[in-house]
Image (tube, rainbow, N blue to C red):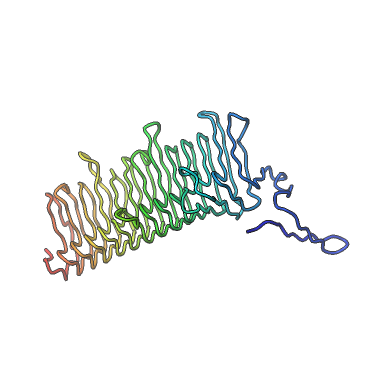
Amino acid sequence: MRETSVRYRRTQRGIVLLVGLLAAIPAAAEEGLIPIFEAQLLFASNGPISGRYIVTRDVTAPENAIAFVGTMGGGDRVEIDLNGFVLRGTGNPAGDFPVIYAQDLVELVVRNGALDGNLNRSGIYCLRCDKVTIEGVSARDVNTGLWLVAPGSFELRRNVIDNPNNHGIRVSGSSMAPASGTIADNLIEEAGEYGIWVEPGAGVDGVTLRGNRIRNAGLANGSNKDGIRVDSTGPVQILRNSVTEVRGSGIHAIVEGGTIEGNIVERADLDGMFVTSSPGTRSSCRIRGNVLLDNGASGLRLGTDGNQIYDNVLNGNTDHGLLFDATADNNNYQGNIIVANGMTCITDNGTGNTAIATNVLTGSPGGCP
């Protein structure tokens, strides 16, 4: 736990050793930064809260370590540089007091530090923030690592979330305004429920999930949640994610349009990938170049129409390599390598699904048409 700053300054008399409490360093003001050295709960009703803040020591708090509550439409903008320090919860307060709580901000930026949820609180919770950027944050022993409710737009990048009781990253939608955003290059391990969950309404204007790594999700008793679940009426880009050893499906996409490409899913207890859409709609996705190996049900399961399924590798899955449900019609597939699955290479319960070019099909005891 860092409590002091040690700096060296060369003078005419040699080297002077400067030792002082980080809370007392005035250098932050030189850059227009406001130091945080103890728990901060700031409310717009009590005065201005907009500003650029920097944490200057580890902070431990029985409830919120930092809370910024703005006024709806008030234009409050807050940037928090954790500066490599740790914000830590302590005790067992009634309810979930997130380590960082934000509400009704025009913009929230949090970067570069660590959060410890003491096994009973979320890392960052943001309610009705118009624009949210969280990057380079580590959250461990949390309820949910990063939870955004009714955001306008969001960028969640290069964060590490370890041992969340519930979800690694959760973005909850709202009928108040459309939302769009990017969730990229995050590492999530040992999640009790979903690794990443984008709920209905949270991706109305489009959402991108790219380069995320998820290992072990759905671990809570009976949850069987997925590594990635996206429920969006807007276009999705689910690109180059890696999902390993989850209790539900690796990727469960309930979507209308977009691209699902270059993902790797291994050893999910259910389907490697399940793509469907809301009743009465079409997903119409480009599903290309995914590798789905050794999963506990089917490699790729389709429950909707109009998808283009190209160049995927579907090997060693317990049930079918490629499964079309009865609700999956008019999908095209070609160039897929479907080998050594436990039941069939392809099972087609829909209508109008067409192989428009050669697929490699072999080694499944139930047959390979």
The residue drawn where x is 44% and y is 38% is: 151
Residue 358 lies in quadrant: bottom left
The single residue placed furthest to the right in the displayed view is 13
> Could you say which is closer to the camera, residue 29 or residue 236?
29
Q: Quadrant of the C terminus?
A: bottom left
In the displayed structure, 282 sits above or below 317; it is above
Q: Return the x and y of residue 267 as percentages of the image width and height.
A: 30, 64
From the viewer's perspective, is 224 left or right of 55?
Answer: left
Q: Quadrant of the N terminus?
A: bottom right
> Could you say which is closer to the camera, residue 148 or residue 358?
148
From the viewer's perspective, is 283 left or right of 88?
Answer: left
The residue drawn where x is 36% and y is 52% is: 194
Q: Return the x and y of residue 201 as percentages of the image width and height.
A: 35, 38
Residue 343 lies in quadrant: bottom left
Q: Return the x and y of residue 122 as percentages of the image width and height.
A: 47, 48
Residue 15 lies in quadrant: bottom right
The residue drawn where x is 23% and y is 50% is: 307
From the viewer's perspective, is 348 left or right of 259?
Answer: left
